[in-house]
Structure formats: structure tokens, C-alpha cells
Image (spheres, grey):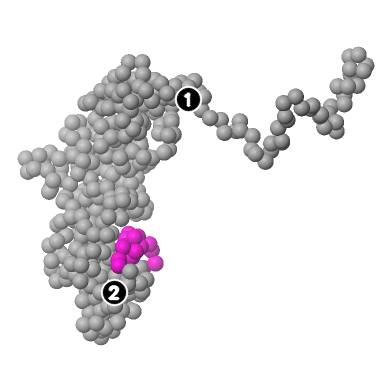
């Protein structure tokens, strides 16, 4: 599910107080009618919220869903695809207690020279 | 659901208007395809009568999305094959497009052509009226295909052209019929005079004069006059078609297609009086 900032704002508010008037989201976050409608539809179709007249209510399923996804929703723990190293870039992993032998040609020789010179 | 960024409101909206607009967006998904258009249209209004009229027109708008179009095309093919009992060996569906410019009839025939049973072939379909009318042999059924019939003027002209071509080519035993995805109900007066069988999936009523009870019609008409007065009268040589072309008062759009000029221009006319560009639900060239 793609989440926009308005989605998170809505879920955060509902998690803290279970129900809110539609207009609240315009007053506090300046959400436009189209923006709020898209957010409401998205979560209503998943049965995470219900809309009763002009009140948005968090369902029990919604409360559990938010709790389950709290890290991603509120702690910015979305998966960062750029952090994953592509397979073709990986080397064979070292075994436990296996000696690590660096590739000497790639070492910065300046460091060893500095050590020898006592710097 | 549109997966684009929707902007936050750039001005504060009153509680009652906000709730009303949000509810409209919730009920009619097509409004959200151009997310700022409804708010701009709403801002065009100055009183409750005008707002009520806008709400009434939106609630009665026929927006045909891709799924509706697919289902409607099946309805059309089924009418041709089952109701009219036309066979592929002597039936030709011809889009009413009359020149090199693309039009809505071609998009309908393109969607329609794969909805027939397996023995129908590409040679049963023409995307150009002049080519179709000049290639069809004796003992044929011609089905003219259009996307939308507004006043009935255009389809009458197309039928006249086909009949003249048939006569000029001295074709024998040719029957012409008409199908359309949508048509205005008032065009039946003209269609009946054409003396050919016709069929449309959607029959549409005029947005004010046929969908508002007599008691409220005058006020609604006045409201629309006031709304249209805020639009530029002309652009690129085109005159604002008040209440839609020839007062058609149409409330119809086929998703992603050019909007017919029969539709109330408040939904698509691109300029305010003074030449400022509007954000509209639909566009037209």
C-alpha cells in the first residue's frame, strides 16, 4: 500500500483518539477535500476505518493494523531499497574464525608509511 | 484510485462546504481524477442555489469509465448479434469518422471489435465512413457506430452521406442501422425521423430541463446563466456553447476521451472571463 503524508496524519490522529470529525483534518493539516477523500477511501476499503456522517472512526481491525505497522508508520522505518546491496556486488562471506586477508593492492600505503614514521 | 500527489488546500474552506465537497469526492471517484477542479467549480458559485445546482449536476453525471465501456461494448455487440440477428458474412460496422481527424467513434469501434463471436473478422469493421461507404458490397448490413449522439444533427448528416453513396454506387439491398454508446433522449425525435433502427446503451436526460422538477427549473436555469457568465465567451475562435451545444444540457463523459461540446461548459470550458485558465474535470480540442 502506497502511503502519503496525509495517510499517516490521519492514522496517527485516529490512533490517539479513535474518532475525528472530517473537518478536523482540514483545520489542522489543511488537507483538501480530494486529498482527504482519497485517504478515507483507501482505508475504508481495507475496513480500517468507518465513516459515520461526518465522523471518521477507527475500527478494531484498523487499531491492530496500525499497531502492527507502527514502525513503518510512525518511526520512518520504511524499507530503504538503496540500502540493499545487489547480489552481483557481493563477495563470498567469510567463515567463522576465518583469517581475513586484505587485498594489499587496494590498501592505502600512506597509513603504513605514517605508522613507520611514528606519526 | 489516482496515485498522484494531491495538493493540500491553498485556502481555508468553511466546515459545511468542506464536508460537502469531501462527500462528493467520496461518492464520485471521477471527481478526484482532477483533484482541484471541484473546488474551483465550487468557488465559481456565489450562493446556495448555484451550489445546489452544481451538486445536482454532479450527482446526475454519467461518467463512463473503462470497465463501464467494456461492459457497454458487450451490450452493443450482443444487440447486434442477438437482437438484430446480423451475421458476419454480410455485416459491416463503420465508425462515423468522416475525415482524417480522429474522433470518438473510432475509439468505440476499436473497443467493440473484439466483443463479437469468433467468426467475425477485422474486415467487418471500418474506422472511416468514406472508406466503409465506398467498399461495402450489395446485400449488406451497415451499422454506423458513434460514441455519443447529442442533438442528432451529426448522425443525420452521416446517414445522409451513406445513403447518397449507396445510391451513387447503385448498391442493391443495403440496410443501414445506427448504434451509439450514449445518446440524448431528446435526439429520439430526430432519430425516429431517420427511419432506421437505432440503439444506444445509455439514454441521457437534459441536466436541468428534464432532471429538475418544474418548480425549480427557472431558478436552476438562472443559476446556470450566472455561472456561465463568469466564463470567457470565446477562445480560439470557438464560442461558449451556453448549456452545451444547442442547449443540449448533457451530463456525460467517456473516461480519457474528448468531452462532447453538448456537455455544460462549466465542466470543461478552459477560461474564466478575463482569460485566466481554469482547472476543469474534462478537456476538449
Residue B225 located within the stretch drawn in magenta: no
Residue lying at the far top in this picture: please name it: A118
What x and y, as percent, mark residue B51? 21, 34
Quadrant the C terminus of chain B occupies = bottom left
Q: Which mark is residue A72?
A: 1
Q: Which mark is residue B88?
A: 2
Q: Nearer the viewer, residue A27 or B49?
A: A27
Question: Given the image, what chain letter belongs to the residue carrying mark 2?
Answer: B
What x and y, as percent, mark residue B99? 36, 68
Above or below: residue A89 compared with residue A101? below
Question: Given the image, what chain letter belongs to the residue carrying mark 1?
Answer: A
Q: Quadrant of residue B81 in the image? A: bottom left
Residue lying at the far right in this picture: please name it: A117
Q: Nearer the viewer, residue A31 or A37?
A: A37
Q: Is residue A110 left or right of residue B83?
A: right
Q: How many callouts does the rendering have?
A: 2
Q: Counting other residues with Cα less than 10 Å from the Cα at mark 1, is it few (<14), some (14-19), or many (20 or more)?
A: few
Q: Which mark is residue B148?
A: none
Q: Secondary structure at mark 2?
A: loop
Q: Quadrant of residue B156 in the image? A: bottom left
Q: Name the residue rendered at 92%, 18% in the picture.
A: A116
Start-end of magenta stretch: B94-117
> Disc 2 versus disc 1: distance between alpha carbons?
58 Å
Quadrant the N terminus of chain B occupies = top left
What x and y, as percent, mark residue A15? 36, 19
Amino acid at each position: 500500500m502506497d502511503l502519503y503524508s496525509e495517510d499517516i496524519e490521519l492514522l496517527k490522529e485516529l490512533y490517539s483518539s479513535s474518532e475525528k470529525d472530517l473537518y478536523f483534518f482540514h483545520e489542522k493539516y489543511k488537507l483538501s477535500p480530494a486529498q482527504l477523500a482519497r485517504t478515507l477511501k483507501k482505508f475504508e476499503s481495507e475496513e480500517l476505518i468507518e465513516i459515520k456522517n461526518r465522523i471518521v472512526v477507527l475500527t478494531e481491525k484498523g487499531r491492530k493494523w496500525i499497531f502492527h505497522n507502527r514502525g513503518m508508520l510512525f518511526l520512518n522505518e520504511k524499507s530503504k531499497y538503496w540500502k540493499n546491496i545487489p547480489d552481483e556486488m557481493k563477495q563470498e562471506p567469510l567463515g567463522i574464525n576465518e583469517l581475513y586477508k586484505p587485498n594489499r593492492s587496494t590498501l592505502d600505503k600512506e597509513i603504513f608509511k605514517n605508522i613507520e614514521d611514528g606519526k | 484510485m489516482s496515485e498522484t500527489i494531491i495538493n493540500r488546500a491553498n485556502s481555508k474552506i468553511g466546515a459545511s462546504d468542506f464536508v460537502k465537497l469531501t462527500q462528493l469526492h467520496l461518492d464520485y471517484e471521477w471527481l478526484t481524477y482532477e483533484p482541484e477542479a471541484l473546488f474551483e467549480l465550487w468557488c465559481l458559485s456565489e450562493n446556495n442555489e448555484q451550489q445546489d445546482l452544481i451538486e445536482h449536476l454532479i450527482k446526475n453525471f454519467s461518467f463512463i469509465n473503462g470497465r463501464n465501456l467494456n461492459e457497454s461494448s458487450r451490450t452493443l455487440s450482443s444487440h447486434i448479434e442477438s437482437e438484430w440477428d446480423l451475421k458476419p458474412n454480410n455485416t459491416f460496422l463503420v465508425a462515423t469518422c468522416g475525415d482524417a481527424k480522429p474522433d470518438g467513434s473510432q475509439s468505440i469501434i476499436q473497443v467493440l471489435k473484439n466483443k463479437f463471436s469468433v467468426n467475425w473478422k477485422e474486415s467487418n469493421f471500418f474506422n472511416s465512413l468514406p472508406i466503409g461507404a465506398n467498399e461495402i458490397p450489395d446485400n449488406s448490413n451497415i451499422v454506423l457506430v458513434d460514441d455519443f449522439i447529442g442533438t442528432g444533427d451529426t448522425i443525420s448528416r452521416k446517414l445522409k452521406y451513406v445513403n447518397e453513396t449507396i445510391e451513387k454506387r447503385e448498391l442493391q439491398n443495403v440496410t443501414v442501422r445506427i448504434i451509439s454508446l450514449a445518446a440524448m433522449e431528446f435526439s429520439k425525435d430526430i432519430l425516429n425521423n431517420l427511419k432506421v433502427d437505432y440503439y444506444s446503451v445509455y439514454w441521457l436526460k437534459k441536466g436541468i430541463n428534464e432532471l429538475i422538477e418544474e418548480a425549480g427549473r427557472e431558478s436552476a436555469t438562472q443559476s446556470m446563466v450566472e455561472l456561465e457568465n463568469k466564463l470567457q465567451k470565446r477562445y480560439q475562435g470557438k464560442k461558449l456553447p451556453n448549456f452545451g451545444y444547442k442547449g443540449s444540457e448533457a451530463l456525460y463523459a467517456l473516461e480519457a476521451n474528448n468531452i462532447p461540446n453538448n456537455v455544460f461548459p462549466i465542466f470543461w470550458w478552459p477560461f474564466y472571463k478575463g482569460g485566466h485558465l481554469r482547472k476543469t474535470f474534462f478537456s476538449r480540442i
